[in-house]
Amino acid sequence: MNARKTWFALVMAAVLMLGAVALMETAPKEPLYLTLEELARFDGQEGRPAYVAIDGVIYDMSESDLWKGGAHNGQQAGKDLSQEILELSPHGLTTLTRVPEVGRLVVEMTAEELAQFDGQEGRPAYVAIDGIIYDMSESDLWKGGAHNGQQAGRDLSREILELSPHGLSTLTRVPVVGRLILELSVEELAGFDGQEGRKAYIAANGSIYDVSDHPAWAGGKHAGFQAGADITQALQDSPHGDSVLEGAQKVGLLLP
């Protein structure tokens, strides 16, 4: 009897373990939010994934037999192919039911640009939370671009994440349309040096990138350079060029 109980316990443990692994494998991944510039990196060449955008949705064609090498019928992955698929293709969206959606195509906005989308006088109602811009225009809770005393066209991260009892839960029903980016002077950029828990930002060619979690920038340092600086000239002199920025998230613009 003891042997049977032991055997049963081992079987149940194995079943539970397999179930846990299955859940991990099927757990939904966080969606990607890519600009057109960022999408271009996923062209299906040299082992890179093959992504295409159609009507704002990004699809992964990497495993599709029709997109070998990231190309199909003269079209290259890494682009917005909305017109080609929706207007010119005889199949339309029907063939996309067999490929996974991985994210949304978004635009970048500064706080000043976001302010224009206040939901007033027929304008869309956009709000930013934790760097992501959501379109509240069709939400019944945001009639006239306002909700609970808050006006659209603003960064409401603190109000939603810290003060609201609902947090991000209500945002699952509204579309993502953009990403809020910072505008920093050289002096302000210097404060993001990756030291003592601070974020590690670098600037290149007028754009600011977050390298806080980049393996090449551990501790905010790389090849003798410290984060918090404009490294445009260093990249031009480097044999690797801009390739060292791969995997780094663009978070802002460097003010002149």
Image: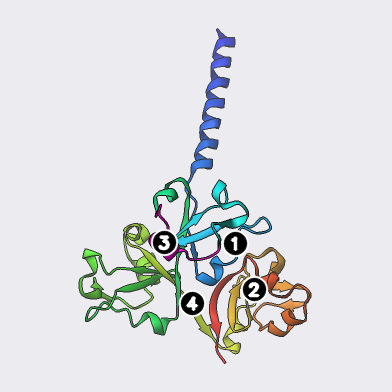
Q: Mark 1 = which residue?
A: 43
Query: Which residue is depicted at the point 53% across and 26% down?
Result: 15
* Residue assigned mark 4: 181
Write the residue at 74% across / 72% down. 222
Quadrant (top left, top right, bottom left, bottom right) of the C terminus: bottom right
Q: Amino acid at mark 2?
A: Gly
Residue occupied by mark 2: 194
Q: Give SS at disc 4.
A: loop
Sequence-wise, the earlier of marks 4 and 1 is: 1
Between 8 and 153, the one lying in front of the other is: 153
The first of marks 2 and 1 along the sequence is 1
Residue 228 locus on image (x, y percent): 64, 80
In magenta stretch: residue 84:
yes
Measured in 3D between alpha carbons, the distance from the residue under mark 4 to the one under mark 1, in whole angstroms, is: 25 Å
Asked whether residue 37 appears in the rendered view, the answer is yes
Front tag of 2 and 1:
1
The disc, 4 or 3, on the residue closer to the chain's N-terminal end is 3
What residue is disc 3 on? 88
- Provide residue 166's location: percent of width, then percent of height: 32, 59
Amino acid marked by disc 1: Asp
Q: Residues within 10 Å of mark 2 (few under 14, many from 20)?
A: many
Say which quarter of the image contains residue 88.
bottom left
Nearer the viewer's eye, disc 4 or disc 3? 3
Query: Where on the picture, by quarter, is residue 112?
Result: bottom left
Give how far apart the Cα atoms at labels 2 and 3 are.
49 Å
Judging depth in this view, the residue of 163 and 38 nearest the camera is: 38
Residues rendered magenta in the picture: 76-92
Residue 56 spot, x, y in % from top left: 41, 64
State the CA–CA distance, disc 3 to disc 1.
21 Å
Using the numbered discs, state the Cα–Cα distance from disc 4 to disc 3 in whole angstroms.
Answer: 35 Å
Crowding at mark 1 (Cα within 10 Å: few <14, some 14-19, many 20+): many
